[in-house]
């Protein structure tokens, strides 16, 4: 192969295509699609992905590939295909699609280097430059910039004295350690020791160490400690040829030094057996199918995953398990490592860049068979996939909120089709989209109605906080919650207190009657804007003034809301001074490993109450937790988001599911200002099916998913007039180019109308069928290309947004 088609790392519309390069003779056998290379591109060198090799190119005067970064392709042929598909699906650049599939460590980083121009004689350089180029012909721009102005350097470049080049740097490299090996047979050691001069005590210690432990190699660091010896003694033995030193790559293993208790398969109950049978059959017949495993919390879904995977591995295939970032708790990792040991790689954002890179390479080298990870693990470079599992499929973290804006579920289904293997989506509260598909038979529905061992679901009490206020309780804890917390304290049982942070401080509510101000056109709460004391609707643009009294009951106690976990903790200590509290939020879990430490502490019963935000809502399975309290159930209901009710229902169900999972029965207290709201009522009764019906009706009436698809176009620019006029043009163009059934809403200011000094406007497309929509959207971006490249305009398109922000 003489030529390669390459996608270069220049994310722009004009460069979003393959470029041909010559393959130098010595690499013609070496280069295959999926490898990363360095190529000249204009004045600089950039990283690129080889997507094809060929014997013929339609272009002449091609440049050559300069450097080869991989010897094994980092993208398999299948992942290359996934990349092309992602580009089509999410309208992203090809380069972004390829890069998102790789660990951050492999992304190129560029360094600007100033080099002495060819033929440039040192003597004719301006004097101030001399010190830099005495010993070398190139200097980092960063270093030279410290003392010499950029303008001066630029002038020198113009004069042809210097040139600026871009050098590609790799972010992280493999971690290497020094290993010391014995270069003689162990049997000779005795004799060698005797031959050493008597003052070479340390060298003797080293040889004795090898002899006594009958080892032939050891890491240098370990040897120094174990044999209590010094670097110089090791060196002299190396110079004598007794030892040799080698560099060996090691993995940064975040779970090293950890023992995972080995577990084995449990006897499945009847419901579990019914659920696993069709999955196993699909595995056995290499048949692609999407299953929705709809099972209440604690019904044993994870055990079904584990046993399905066992079958996959037995067939010599590989599996991917996605879990939401925040539930990638040690508990979850333990369950997989406990069953599959070293066959498991773990990928999540708590790992360092280097650790992630190492876990990824274990997959690439086929040293593991299974990956458990957050969203991006869906791109694990397995080439013989036998199953993909997405736990808590309703979690919004499966959608990436930046380019490429993909949903892991879509990628999973696409990959599983290519590999002819099943996808299992699991949840106690599936998204409406997914459940609707299972009702239509697109996905196969598997149901687990009961908790394992028929344990009952915890009873739920809804506490009306308006009532509490009327009775003179101005604290954030209801009388009933405090009583029950006290009861648990006296019995030595544990409680979980959950504060829903999302949605705080943005909506306006009456503390006396619970009335929340909503848009008269959209059934969505208005957002409070401190600036100008205004309330705005982010869907239709409607706005009004912040009222002085409640429009419903005339009370003056109308205001916007806000409380943090820290505040809750302070208050809690006041009412329950004897309780031991662990607080988990962004502040206490910022440090690496903190999350895990706090949970372990709680698990060891070193605390009575676990207080936290979203991050404690999922996946936790502690036997002594018998009480769950939700401090403000309705905050999320008021987000400007048509999924607000659905998300509230999901969250309440998840949190309630943490109580009474083992022998002791559980209880749940939900505090709210909107006790009659259907998503709170139905969550408290574990009535997913009824919730589904009711919510579907609303979605139908308001033309939202799953009845309609949504595409969101967001325009941003530092000048508001520009933003408005572009968004207006975008909306008009869309209106002209879609069918009658499709609705175009906008232009309207985005829910967050300005970020980092850029104004944001949006336009929403609601459609059922719109075959050419992607093409139309692409045309829009192309049309504004000039403004995008040179005038700081940004147009983002999100097909299927999970938030409207
Ligand atoms: N067949 C079984 N026999 C005995 N115990 C089981 C069985 N299946 C699961 N369990 C146990 O029941 C508990 C709940 O199961 P699991 O965590 O798998 O449920 P889940 O549906 O995944 O829960 P959630 O969605 O709430 O996280 C666990 O402690 C698990 O070990
Ligand atoms: Zn009121
Ligand atoms: Zn509105």
Image: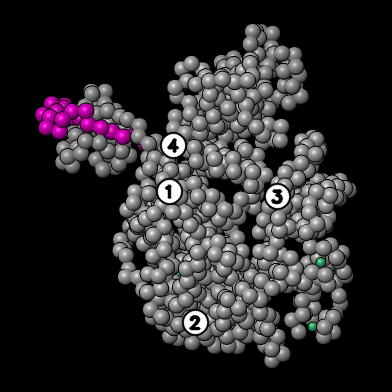
Vertical comparison of 200 with 780: above or below = above
Classed neighbour count for the residue bearing mark 3: other residues with Cα under 10 Å, few (<14), some (14–19), many (≥20): few
Chosen colour scheme: one colour
Disc nearer the start of the sequence (1/2): 1
Nearer to us in this view, 742 or 356: 742
> Residue 712 placed where, x, y %?
73, 54
Which residue is labeled 3 in the image? 771
Which residue is labeled 1 in the image? 385
Quarter of image, ligand 1: bottom left
Cβ of mark 2 under 8 Å from ligand 1: the answer is: no
Cβ of mark 3 under 8 Å from ligand 3: the answer is: no
Which residue is labeled 2 in the image? 458
> Residue 249 placed where, x, y %?
37, 36
Residue 108 shows in the view: yes
Nearer to us in this view, 656 or 728: 728
User: From mark 1 to mark 2, how far is it between C-alphas?
Assistant: 38 Å
Inspect the magenta stretch and tell me whether residue 371 lies in it.
no
Residue at position x 79%, y 81% from top? 557
Query: Disc 1 vs disc 4: Cβ atoms closer than 8 Å?
Result: no
User: From mark 2 to mark 3, how far is it between C-alphas?
Assistant: 47 Å
345 vs 522, left or right, is left
Q: Which residues are magenta?
A: 177-201
Identify the secondary structure beneath mark 4. loop
Vertical comparison of 136 with 703: above or below = above
User: From mark 2 to mark 4, how far is it between C-alphas?
Assistant: 49 Å
Identify the secondary structure beneath mark 1. strand
In the displayed orientation, state which residue is furthest to the bottom.
471
User: Which of the 4 quarters of the picture holds residue 518?
Assistant: bottom right
């Amino acid at each position: 192969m003489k030529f390669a088609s390459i996608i270069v790392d220049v994310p722009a519309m004009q460069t979003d295509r393959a470029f041909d390069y010559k393959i130098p003779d010595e690499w013609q056998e070496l280069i295959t699609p999926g490898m990363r290379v360095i190529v000249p591109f204009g004045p600089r060198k950039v990283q690129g992905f080889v997507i094809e090799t060929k014997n013929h190119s339609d272009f002449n005067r091609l440049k050559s590939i300069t450097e080869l970064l991989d010897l094994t392709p980092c993208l398999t042929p299948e992942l290359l295909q996934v990349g092309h598909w992602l580009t089509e699906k999410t309208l992203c650049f090809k380069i972004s699609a390829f890069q998102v599939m790789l660990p951050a460590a492999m992304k190129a980083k560029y360094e600007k280097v100033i080099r002495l121009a060819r033929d440039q004689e040192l003597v004719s350089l301006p004097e101030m430059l001399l010190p830099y180029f005495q010993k070398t012909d190139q200097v980092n721009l960063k270093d030279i910039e410290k003392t010499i102005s950029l303008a001066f350097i630029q002038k020198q470049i113009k004069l042809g004295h210097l040139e600026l080049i871009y050098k590609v740097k790799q972010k992280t490299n493999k971690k290497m350690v020094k290993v010391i090996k014995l270069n003689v047979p162990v049997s000779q050691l005795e004799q060698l020791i005797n031959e050493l001069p008597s003052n070479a005590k340390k060298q003797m210690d080293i040889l004795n160490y090898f002899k006594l432990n009958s080892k032939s190699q050891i890491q240098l660091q370990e040897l120094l400690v174990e044999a209590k010896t010094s670097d110089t003694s090791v060196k002299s033995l190396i110079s004598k040829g007794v030892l040799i030193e080698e560099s060996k790559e090691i993995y940064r293993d975040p779970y090293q030094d950890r023992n995972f208790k080995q577990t084995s398969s449990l006897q499945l109950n009847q419901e579990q057996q019914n659920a696993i049978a069709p999955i196993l059959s699909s595995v056995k017949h290499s048949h692609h199918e999407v299953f929705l495993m709809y099972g209440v919390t604690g019904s044993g879904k994870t055990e079904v995953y584990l046993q399905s995977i066992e079958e996959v591995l037995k067939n010599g295939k590989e599996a991917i398990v996605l879990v939401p970032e925040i539930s990638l708790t040690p508990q979850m990792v333990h369950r997989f490592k406990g069953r599959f040991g070293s066959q498991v790689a773990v990928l999540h954002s708590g790992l360092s860049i280097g650790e992630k890179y190492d876990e990824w390479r274990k997959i690439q080298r086929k040293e593991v068979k299974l990956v458990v990870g957050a969203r991006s693990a869906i791109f694990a470079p397995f080439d013989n996939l036998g199953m993909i599992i997405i736990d808590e499929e309703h979690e919004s973290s499966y959608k990436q909120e930046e380019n490429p804006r993909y949903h892991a579920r879509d990628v999973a289904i696409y990959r599983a089709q290519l590999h002819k293997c099943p996808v299992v989506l699991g949840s106690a509260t599936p998204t409406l989209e997914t459940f609707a598909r299972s009702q239509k038979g697109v996905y196969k529905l598997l149901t687990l109605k009961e908790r394992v061992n028929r344990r009952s679901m915890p009873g739920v009490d809804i506490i009306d906080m308006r009532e509490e206020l009327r009775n003179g309780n101005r604290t954030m804890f209801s009388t009933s919650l405090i009583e029950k917390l006290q009861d648990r304290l006296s019995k030595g049982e544990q409680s979980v207190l959950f504060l829903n942070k999302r949605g705080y401080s943005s909506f306006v509510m009456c503390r006396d009657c619970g009335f929340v101000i909503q848009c008269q056109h959209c059934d969505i709460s208005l957002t409070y804007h401190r600036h100008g004391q205004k309330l705005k609707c982010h869907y239709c643009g409607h706005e009004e003034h912040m009222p002085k009294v409640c429009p419903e009951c005339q009370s003056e106690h109308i205001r916007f809301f806000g409380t943090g976990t820290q505040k809750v903790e302070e208050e809690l200590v006041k009412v329950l001074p004897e309780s031991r509290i662990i607080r988990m939020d962004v502040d206490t879990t910022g440090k690496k490993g903190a999350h895990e430490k706090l949970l372990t502490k709680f698990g060891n019963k070193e605390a009575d109450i676990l207080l936290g935000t979203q991050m404690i809502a999922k996946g936790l399975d502690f036997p002594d937790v018998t009480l769950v309290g939700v401090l403000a159930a309705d905050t999320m209901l008021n987000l400007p988001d048509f999924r607000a009710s659905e998300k509230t229902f999901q969250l309440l169900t998840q949190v309630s599911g943490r109580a009474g999972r083992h022998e002791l029965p559980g209880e749940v207290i939900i505090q709210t200002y909107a006790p009659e709201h259907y998503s709170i009522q139905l969550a408290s009764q574990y009535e997913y099916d009824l919730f589904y019906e009711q919510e579907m009706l609303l979605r139908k009436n308001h033309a939202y998913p799953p009845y309609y698809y949504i595409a969101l176009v967001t325009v941003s620019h530092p000048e508001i007039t520009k933003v408005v006029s572009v968004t207006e043009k975008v909306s008009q163009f869309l209106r002209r180019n879609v069918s009658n059934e499709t609705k175009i809403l906008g232009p309207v200011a985005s829910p967050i109308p300005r970020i980092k000094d850029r104004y944001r406007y949006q336009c929403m497309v609601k459609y059922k069928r719109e075959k050419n929509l992607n093409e139309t959207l692409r045309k829009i971006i192309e049309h504004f290309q000039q403004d995008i490249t040179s005038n700081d305009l940004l147009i983002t398109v999100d097909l299927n947004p999970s938030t409207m922000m």
